[in-house]
Image (cartoon, grey):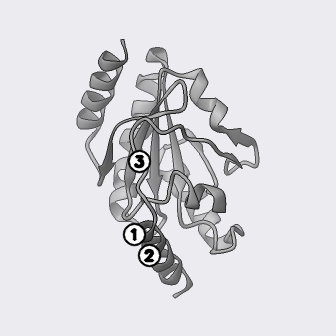
């Protein structure tokens, strides 16, 4: 019930606030699921960063994670990084939810999606995540930290994501 309430709150907040637009700079400071500090500086290390927002309760999110894990490996040489944000692992006050955190770790291990997964913060929820109305939601960010392309709702196949990545890389040249 607590999880459903959090999802409802996130949906209400996202519908009330303005949407993130391509070209807006994304800034954040948080930790990954291993407790390591992660900031928006990670964008500068890559041509493109694919940010996949997912939920532990979301079958389509979990089904696409093995493909995302493979894409992460396949695209390293192209300076493309994939990061995940499990949106339901904090409560409305920004506190980490123990069971959901455990669930996220288990899902990551089972699916082979061993790229960086960032713990969302309240600032992120009111910032660049404010327009997330469903999961999975995926955005792409360039090396200057600006969102590029469109917001992608729903899961996609490995082939479909690779085409989107290749098209965005071509557009970056």
Residue at left 64%, top 73%? 91
Which of marks 1 and 3 precedes in the sequence?
Answer: 1
Residue at the disc numbered 1? 15
Residue 125 point in image, percent of width and height: 57, 60
Image vertical order of residue 163 relative to residue 38, above or below: above
The circle drawn on residue 12 is 2
Q: Earlier in the sequence, mark 2 or mark 3?
A: 2
Query: Callout 1 environment at 10 Å: few (<14), some (14 to 19), or many (20+)?
Result: some
Q: From the image, state whether disc 2 or disc 3 is nearer to you.
A: 2
Residue 65 - label: 3
Q: Residues within 10 Å of mark 3 (few under 14, many from 20)?
A: many
**Label 2 – label 1 distance at C-alpha:** 5 Å
Query: Does residue 1 sit above or below 116 in this rendering?
Result: below
Kindly check if marks 2 and 1 are in contact, taking CB atoms under 8 A apart as contact. yes
- In the drawing, what numbered circle is on residue 171? none
Camera-side residue of 127 and 76? 127
Query: Within 10 Å of the Cα at label 2, are there few (<14), some (14-19), or many (20+) other Cα atoms?
Result: some
Measure the alpha-carbon separation of dots 2 and 3: 27 Å
């Amino acid at each position: 019930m607590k999880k459903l309430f959090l999802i409802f709150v996130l949906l209400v907040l996202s519908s009330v606030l303005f949407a993130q637009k391509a070209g807006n700079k994304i800034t954040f400071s948080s930790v990954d699921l291993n407790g390591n500090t992660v900031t928006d500086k990670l964008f500068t290390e890559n041509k493109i960063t694919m940010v996949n927002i997912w939920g532990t309760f979301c079958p389509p999110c979990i089904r696409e994670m093995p493909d995302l894990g493979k894409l992460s490996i396949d695209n390293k040489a192209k300076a493309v990084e994939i990061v995940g944000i499990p949106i339901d692992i904090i409560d409305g006050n920004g506190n980490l939810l123990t069971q959901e955190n455990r669930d996220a770790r288990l899902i990551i291990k089972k699916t082979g999606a061993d790229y960086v997964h960032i713990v969302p913060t309240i600032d992120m929820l009111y910032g660049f995540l404010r327009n997330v109305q469903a999961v999975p939601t995926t955005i792409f960010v360039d090396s200057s930290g600006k969102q590029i392309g469109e917001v992608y709702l729903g899961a996609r196949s490995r082939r479909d994501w690779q085409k989107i990545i290749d098209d965005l890389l071509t557009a970056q040249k």
